[in-house]
Amino acid sequence: MLIDTDGRVLLRKPKNEFDNYVWTFAKGRPLPGEKPEQAALRAVLEECGVKAGIVRRIPGTFAGGTSDTIYYLMRPMETGLPMDDETEEIRWVDVDQAKKVISLTRNKVGRKRDLAVLDAALAARESDV
């Protein structure tokens, strides 16, 4: 989960709104031998074309439709890199807009999870300020 120095959140639109996600965060399962932090950084790079740095783990585990996921609060280090074909579009938005567009997701479990991740990330970010 990326938040830039202006407080904007990076969201991705999955290609063809896969699994009824309209806007969501990058995520992925670790490859064999890969640590969760490495998987998170790889997912952001592959799905959003952003090289990022981890600020801290977002407290909690977040239930999705098929697995429980941990998230990391990240900052962008390099943007505009190539991304995979699973992402239709990426967008930097302010927090209020992030809540609005995440709410468009028709996957109820995923929508609830993403809104919870956003709230937890904002709380984690505030504790670092």
Image: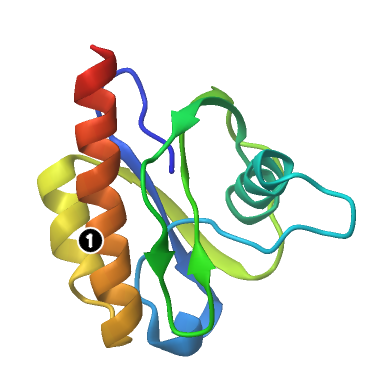
Image-quadrant location for residue 38: top right
Residue drawn where x is 28% and y is 31% of the image: 124
The answer to whether 31 appears left or right of 44 in the picture is: right
| Relative vertical location of residue 69 with respect to residue 21 in this rendering, above or below | above
- Residue sitting at 23 percent across and 61 percent down? 115
57, 54: nearer the viewer:
57
SS category of the residue bearing label 1: helix
Q: Name the residue under label 1.
A: 115
Expressed as whole percent of the image width and height from the top left, the position of residue 23 reads 35, 66
Identified at 37% across, 50% down, the residue is 60
| Residue 99 visible to the viewer | yes
**As drawn, is 57 to the left or to the right of 50?**
left
Name the amino acid, label 1. Leu
> Toward the viewer: 95 or 35?
35
Q: x and y percent of residue 39 in the render? A: 71, 49
| Horizontal arrangement in the rendering, residue 33 relative to residue 9 (left or right) | right
Which quarter of the figure is the C terminus placed in? top left
Q: Viewer-proximal residue, 62 or 84?
A: 62
Q: Which residue lies furthest to the top in this view?
A: 129
Q: In the rendered image of this protein, does residue 114 appear above or below residue 36?
A: below
**Compared with residue 31, is residue 22 higher up or lower down, i.e. above or below?**
below
* Picture mark count: 1
* Residue 64 x/y as whole percent: 42, 76
Identify the image quadrant of the N terminus: top left
